[in-house]
Amino acid sequence: MIEERAFNGLSEEFLEIAYAKNWFRLFVKKELGGAETSLPEAMQALFDAAHLDGSLGWCVNLGSGASYFSGFLKPDVALELLGDPKSVFAGSGQIGKAIQTGDHYVISGSWPRCTGAVHATSFTANAELKDGSVRSFVLPRDQVKISNTWTLMGLERSSTYQIDAADVEIPLDHSFEIGSLNAESAYSIHLIPFEPFARCCMIASLLGMTGCFIDKVDADSGLRERTGIQKELAELKMTIAESFQHFQQHAHQLEKCCNSETDASKVVEQICNDVINIAALIREKINAIYYLGGLQIADTKNPANSAFKDLLVAGQHNLFR
């Protein structure tokens, strides 16, 4: 039995910023209502969102990542689901069950950790058909139950919650197969292999969160004046700036290879290794600052403490390992 707990989502202020900047639809074609960004442009947006707030950054990262699947849908379906300025996808990699019956699918299952569940308008979910194949489906918000199952210590306002569906009927064209592009809905971003694409997005978000942590520490006069913290903050700021520029270059190279059908394997391998190494370096440096901050930064009411925990939880994602 799932314990019923209150929802804790993004503030209206943060949501309005995200809607105005089209952050939840970074990878949707302009004619379908999206921003149609390049990967470097998207990384800047993801960095900026996370720099404002960790939970906002995580929601934008995962929400825009889910809207990437618009490239696998028919254009009229993508427009129906993502055409509104406040359209947001949320999703989960868990696998449920699907049955095809005539002109629709019947979907059932539970999908944990759907980031942005409180403000999402649709949910992407994987499900297995009778023949053993797995497809992805877009479930309407009003047909799923949302439960607050988040028990981790950070990103508490990201509303990363579980959804449950019981015999939800959806049209056949509200389903897609990841990697099977629709030429009318996709654009150049969809030529990039999903894993390096996701790693670039993730590291941009993590670097932005690190900037947010620095800002919170720097805004606290008591923390700012503690011995050794200014030196650590200066070094971490430099690490962020240099790392972000480095990954922007990776993103440019990756796009260039994929758009020209050049072998991108070396760039992909470098991105993977560099993401893991930079994530480890960030973890080391924020832990050093936390240690120097003493009990003051350990206070759960301190904004720096909240930003620190957001970073720790985000850094546990398997794409950083």
Image (cartoon, rainbow, N blue to C red):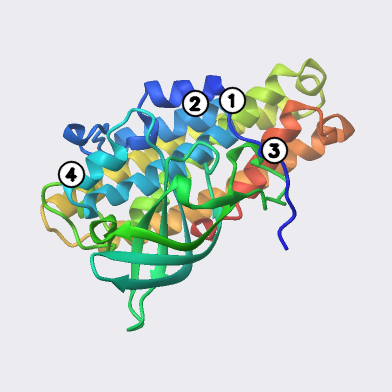
Q: In this rendering, is residue 260 above or below 110?
A: above
Position of the C terminus by quadrant? bottom right
The kind of residue tagged 1 is Ser
The N terminus is located in which quarter? bottom right
- Front: mark 2 or 3: 2
SS of the residue under disc 1: loop
Tag 2's secondary structure? helix
Q: Mark 4 or mark 1: which is in front?
A: 4
Give the labeled residue for mark 2. Answer: 15
Q: Which of marks 3 and 1 is nearer the N terminus?
A: 1
User: Which callout, 4 or 3, points to the residue nearer the camera?
Assistant: 4
Q: Could you give the CA–CA distance between mark 4 and mark 3, rounded to whole angstroms?
A: 42 Å
Tell which circle, 4 or 2, labels the residue nearer the N-terminal end.
2
N-term-proximal mark, 2 vs 3: 2
Q: Is mark 3 on a helix, strand or loop?
A: helix
Tell me the mark number nearer the camera, choosing from 3 and 1.
Answer: 1
Q: Which of marks 4 and 1 is nearer the N terminus?
A: 1
Q: Is mark 4 on a helix, strand or loop?
A: helix
Label 2: how many Cα within 10 Å (few below 14, some 14–19, many 20+): some
Disc 4 versus disc 2: nearer the observer: 4
**Residue 308 got which mark?**
3
Marks 4/1: CA–CA distance: 31 Å
Q: In this view, does 109 lie to the left or right of 44?
A: right
The answer to whether mark 2 and mark 1 are in CB contact below 8 A is yes
